[in-house]
Amino acid sequence: MATQGLEKVLKLPADALKLTEPQLQEAKRDIVAYLLECIKVEINGVSVEAVPGTMEPVYDTLVGSGEKYISYARQQFRFPSATPINRVTLSAAFFLTVTSQHHAALTISWNGVQRPFSRYGPFELELTAARMNPTWWNTAGEFIVWGCATFSSGTTTSHSSWRCSWPRGSCATW
C-alpha cells in the first residue's frame, strides 16, 4: 500500500516521506488491522482468515533531491486451505473514506502462472485455474472492459500494488 495513502486513513509515526523502516514496523499492527478490514478471501466458497506475515518497505527516489523514501509497504498474508483450491474470490475495498475510485493493481500467481489484474473502487475478483490461463479472446475482452472503466472514470487519486499467490493448499497476498 502507498504510504501516502495509508497516512490518510491511519496515524503513522512520521510523515510518509520521512518514515523509516523501524517506524514502518512500529505501524505494522495498525496497517494489518486496516488491511484486514478491507480484504476478504473465500476459497472454494468458504471464508478464510488471513494470517499476517512479513512487511517490507518499497523505496522510491524523490526527483528533486534524489533522496530515498518508503513509498509502499508490502504486507504479506497467508490464507490457508485444508483442501485443494478450485476457486478463489478476493473482495477488497480500499480507501473508501478518501475515494471511491482507488486503483488496485494485483499480480496473482497460481501454480506457477503469474497474471496481472487491475481493479478500480470496491471490487470482487473471481479466480479459477482456467482464468489464470486465458485465451486470446478472454484477454481482449478484459482489456476492453478495463479501458472503458479507465477512460470513463478519468484520473485516479490513489493506487496500490498487490501480489497474490495460491500455491497448492494455501494462498498469500502481499
Image (spheres, rainbow, N blue to C red):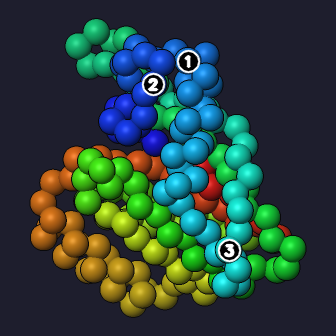
x and y percentages locating residue 107 in the rendered image: 53, 59
Q: Amino acid at mark 3?
A: Ser
Q: Earlier in the sequence, mark 1 or mark 2?
A: 2
Between 15 and 118, which is closer to the camera in this rendering? 15
Q: In the shown orientation, is residue 131 left or right of residue 53?
A: left
Q: Tell which tag, 1 or 2, sits nearer the viewer.
A: 2
Determine the residue positioned at 33% across, 12% down. Answer: 66
Q: Are circles 3 and 2 on residues that touch, CB within 8 Å?
A: no
x and y percentages locating residue 157 in the rendered image: 22, 47
Determine the residue positioned at 80% across, 71% down. Answer: 81
Location of mark 2 (residue): 12
Mark sitting on residue 47: 3
Q: Is residue 138 above or below residue 97?
A: below
Disc 3 and disc 1: Cα gap in Å?
Answer: 32 Å
Between 73 and 111, which is closer to the camera in this rendering? 73
* Residue 68 is at least partly visible in this image: no
Location of mark 1 (residue): 23
Between 14 and 65, which is closer to the camera in this rendering? 14
Between 60 and 125, which is closer to the camera in this rendering? 125
Secondary structure at badge 2 equals: loop
Q: Is residue 49 above or below residue 125?
A: above
* Residue 115 is at least partly visible in this image: yes
x and y percentages locating residue 149 in the rendered image: 22, 72
Q: Earlier in the sequence, mark 3 or mark 2?
A: 2
Q: Are circles 1 and 2 on residues that touch, CB within 8 Å?
A: yes
Q: Amino acid at mark 2?
A: Leu
